[in-house]
Image (spheres, rainbow, N blue to C red):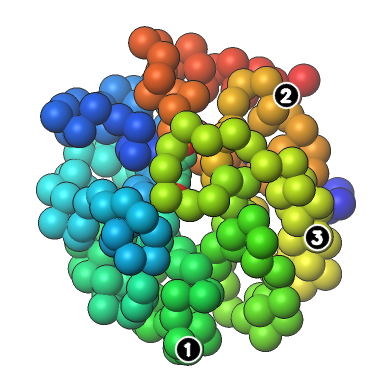
Amino acid sequence: MSTIPPTYRIAPSLLSADFARLGDELKAVIAGGADWIHFDVMDNHYVPNLTFGPMVCQALKPHARRADGSAVPIDVHLMVQPVDALAAAFADAGADLISFHPEASAHVHRSVQAIKAKGCQAGLVFNPATPLDVLDWTIDDIDLILIMSVNPGFGGQSFIDSALRKIEQARRRIDASGRDIRLEVDGGIKIDNIRRVADAGADTFVAGSAIFGKPDYQAVMDAMRLALKG
Ligand code: DX5
Ligand code: ZN
């Protein structure tokens, strides 16, 4: 484990927001303290569900600001195959970070470079059964590792415990690299398990149903931060 205390980030997933009121939901979750906005892009091909595309990201981008005017980063999680064309479209639509599943790209290194060439941070996403081996050859180029603690495609699933071991492994790889890489976890994160996930080495937490499923978004995020402190 690193000796520098981590700066935790909470990234609410708009997947669980009320799509009929998406702009208001975005503003509400930012007012409640969201550090990042997690944007789950599904293509009904790589995963069996279909969500939103770059035009929706572009429409929301001007509203991704706090009351003090500072921008809230848009964290795009691509569950699409192929990767490169949509990654470029999301970069043009205002994404700050773009992550993809290595299985979905024929040329992982090239996809990472293409995202970075657009001025975005690049991340790799690991499904529950996907090993971390591709990091042997990519860790020097990426800004984010996203560990899936559910199978991608749907919100509201239960946390898969083996993700904790994978988070520990990813943390060791990041520490050995000496690089500043975010370690994000996605799926089944709740107030009552976020501490365990942080103890395994994660510093960034996606939460969809835990936040949007409750009436008071700030109360949920405050409780998560309290758990992270404790
Ligand atoms: C699943 C998505 C997740 C999802 C998490 O494919 O990548 O971001 O929204 O939802 P919860 O927090 O409800 O498990
Ligand atoms: Zn996600």
Looking at the picture, tell me which residue is in the foreground, 43 or 76: 43
| Kind of residue indicated by mark 2 | Lys
Q: Earlier in the sequence, mark 1 or mark 3?
A: 1
Comparing labels 3 and 2, the label whose residue is closer to the camera: 3
The quadrant holding residue 175 is bottom right
Question: Residue 24: where, in percent of width, then height?
Answer: 19, 26
- Distance in Å between CA atoms under marks 1 and 3: 24 Å
Name above or below for residue 67 compared with residue 46: above
Q: Which label number is shown at residue 107?
A: 1
In the rendered image, the residue lying farthest to the front is 48
Name above or below for residue 70 compared with residue 178: above
Comparing labels 2 and 1, the label whose residue is closer to the camera: 1
| Kind of residue indicated by mark 3 | Gln
In the picture, measured across the screen, residue 214 lies left or right of residue 157, that is left
Identify the residue under disc 2: 229
Label 1: element kind: loop
Question: Residue 192: where, in percent of width, then height?
Answer: 67, 21
Name above or below for residue 113 compared with residue 20: below
| Kind of residue indicated by mark 1 | His
Identify the residue under disc 3: 169
- Residue at 20% in and 39% down: 63
Q: Earlier in the sequence, mark 2 or mark 1?
A: 1
Q: Can you tell me whether the CB of the residue at mark 1 lies under 8 Å from the nearest atom of ligand 2?
A: no
Question: Residue 41: where, in percent of width, then height?
Answer: 32, 55
- Distance in Å between CA atoms under marks 3 and 2: 23 Å
Question: Residue 88: where, in percent of width, then height?
Answer: 27, 75
